[in-house]
Amino acid sequence: MAHRPKRTFRQRRADSSDSDGTEGPSAGPGQPGEPAAPGPEDEGPPPGGGRAEAARRPFRGRGSRGRGRVWASSRRAIGAAPRAGGGSGAPESRTVDHSADEEDGTQHASESKDDQSSPSNSSSSLEEEFSSIVNIPDAAFIQAARRKRELARTQEDYISLDVKHTSTISDMKENSDEDPESEPDDHEERIPFTPKPQTLKQRMAEETTTRNEETSEGSQEDENQDIWEQQQMRKAIKITEGRNIDLSHSSEFQTVKKFDTSISFPPVNLEIIKKQLNTRLTLLQDTHRSHLREYEKYIEDVKSSKNAIQNLENSSDQAPNIKFYKSMKIYVENLIDCLNEKITNIQEIESSMHALLLKQAMTFMKRRQDELKHESTYLQQLSRKAETSTNGSLAIDEKTQWILEEIESRRARRRQARALSGNCDPQEGASSDDELSSADMIDFQKSQDDILQDHKKIFEDVHDDFCNIQNILLKFQQWREKFPDSYYEAFIGLCIPKLLNPLIRVQLIDWNPLKFDSIGLKQMSWFTSIEEFMDSSMEDAKKEDSSDKKILSAVINKTIIPRLTDFVEFIWDPLSTSQTTSLITHCGMILEEHSTWENEVSKGKQDLLKSIVSRMKKAIEDDVFIPLYPKSAVENKTSPHSKFQERQFWSGLKLFCNILLWNGLLPDDALQELALGKLLNRYLIVALHNAVPGPDVVKKCSQITAYLPEKWFENSAMRTSIPQLENFIQFLLQSAHKLSRSEFRDEVKEIILILVKVRALNQADSFIEEYHLDHLKSVINEV
């Protein structure tokens, strides 16, 4: 059997005679609700409509689901009334309810249906108050209205599909009228086995009822619902107090809305209305006048601005100024665009030239190291005679043989070149081995020419005003002379080095500071142009505050020093005296003559000096090699071992000289650490100890002393030499002891002079007193 769904939304059923209002919601599955048609039961008390209207408002605020769609079913009931043709007074009651809904702008019928089914006995005080205002019909009147509705339903112009017996329906309704709270038992309910046709109103009512029941079951607010219903009833009663609704039952199904004359309105005073309108008009007129004044002010501002522009353009004083500033603006923009377009080509050509020079430097370095390795290996094998053949010749591979022949041929060419130049220096190791073969020289020259050709094409399509440094500086000089205030306010002195940087780099592409015949920086056109620009600014009244005098220092710091640093780190060979001398010349101009720029170039200067020290330290570790052979092998000056050792010693002594050439540019501590600590004490003195005492050793010691800077020994009160020369002085004393007992007595005096030069006066006095060399005391006294 079908069970009636539990009603959780309503806990109490109404006892009022408006039982038909509860019939729709209470219909179970076995007894579907009847379609709403106008009948006598709709003639119920109008507060039902008021309650529905009052109930709909808070339900919309609470967001009740499903209630907003029931308004369509209530409008369908209104439309069904004319077809019924029966019922005299009921339609009027329902139309009044809908008119109230239309006044509020909402027509939600679900709340109306819920309120119609709300209990009439929920509060006796509310019913008494409500009945005092509206006449509630009695039970006999409601029964008569219900019978009229049944008759109207049977007189429809269509055959109803509802096969339910009228008597059964009427009996059930009578039972419901007599006992509204009575419910049929489960065994008395009729079970429908086929679905009955339902109208749109019934389907919407069922859907709404289901949603309402689901919502009420989840909320568990039954107790609060009763309180809320009482509040809505009070609101509905207050609303109906100001309305006069005609509750008479008529046969006409028209909506009639009567005006309640009992409602009193405040008296209409034309003077008050007129006064309010005048006040409003006055406010609008004042606002309009203020807007007009603002508009006129803006118009005057626009006119004055236009006049000022015309006056400035037509003025004899300001017109040239504006014209000049516009031209300078356009010129600078075009200059920047040009440099931005060309900077990529400049960087590519710079990289190509740097790679070419680096390749050449690496070729020289690798060749020197390979030749040193092969020659040393050959001499070791020769001294051991480990791999000799039966005829006494040394078996060597073809590569070593070819390298030795190549080394000897280059030495022969250098000896011949020295003889032709008149420089008969017998020390072969002192000459630079940086010759290229004819094929390598041709390839290098061809690559360099190609790069220089591309270098000339960089600015071939650019006007001189945008690529000539002198013309560019002339433009800014005109600005400085005409408008010095704006010139200095724009900090042009700080911008010029950045603008000139690409142009100066182009001129430095073919500049090699390691070549002995390379042009100096002072002879370059960009250098002279910047100096002239700076000199002209000295005549300005604001020369003390001018930044133009720092332009040259900024250019050297940002452009020249980085390029020199690259040459020092990657291309410079410290063993080459020519390269070292040329590099010192260019660095001396930067580090000495521009000492006034110490603050500006301090960072670049420190980076350059660090690079120089690091490169010389690397040369000492990689390129200095002085082998030690038995004295029997080196006593013969014509032996290959003796010649190789001599060459390597003079090569190390040449590096010693090249390092000390940096005296005055590098700190004394760094020079003493490199030349004396790392080179002299580790390599040269060891080779001197292995040599045979004699005039050659004294000559080498004298040459070492000649390279030492004189400023290290300028202190007249100094009786002891610097600590790094202690080992050298001890070697000199040992050599003097050995020579004093041999036939080389003249060399002893030379050693005493060396001790005096290095300020080892105490050691010299002790030696003279020990060997009673009184004739040498005059040498010490002359110091």
Image: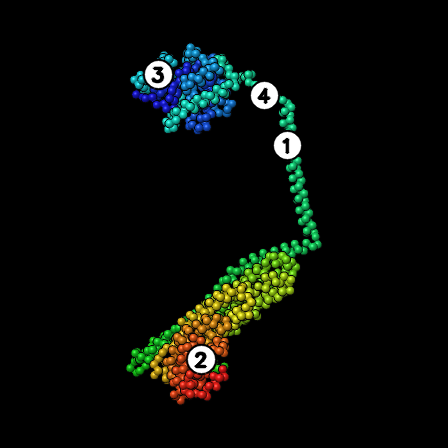
Question: Which residue matches tag 4?
Answer: 266
Helix, strand or loop at label 4? It is loop
Residue at left offset 53%, top offset 69%: 590
Give the colour scheme of this rendering. Answer: rainbow
Comparing marks 3 and 4, which lies closer to the viewer? 4
Q: Which mark is residue 760?
A: 2
3 and 4 marks in contact (CB < 8 Å): no
Q: Amino acid at mark 4?
A: Pro
Between the C-alphas of marks 3 and 4, the distance is 53 Å
Q: How far apart in space, not on screen, are marks 1 and 2 (Cα)?
A: 110 Å
Badge 2 marks a residue whose secondary structure is loop
At x 47%, y 72%, the residue is 668
Q: Is residue 423 above or below residue 236?
A: below
Mark 4 or mark 2: name the one nearer the start of the chain.
Answer: 4
Q: CA distance from mark 4 to mark 2?
A: 129 Å
Farthest right residue? 316
What residue is drawn where x is 34% and y is 23%?
A: 5
Query: Of label 2 and label 3, which has the lower sequence position?
Result: 3
Q: Secondary structure at mark 3?
A: loop
> Viewer-proximal residue, 150 or 745?
745
**Disc 3 residue type (three-letter):** Ser
The local secondary structure at tag 1 comes to helix
- Mark in the foreground, 4 or 1: 4
Between circles 4 and 2, the one closer to the viewer is 2
Which residue extends farthest left? 390
Amino acid carrying mark 1 in the image: Leu
- First in sequence: mark 3 vs mark 4: 3
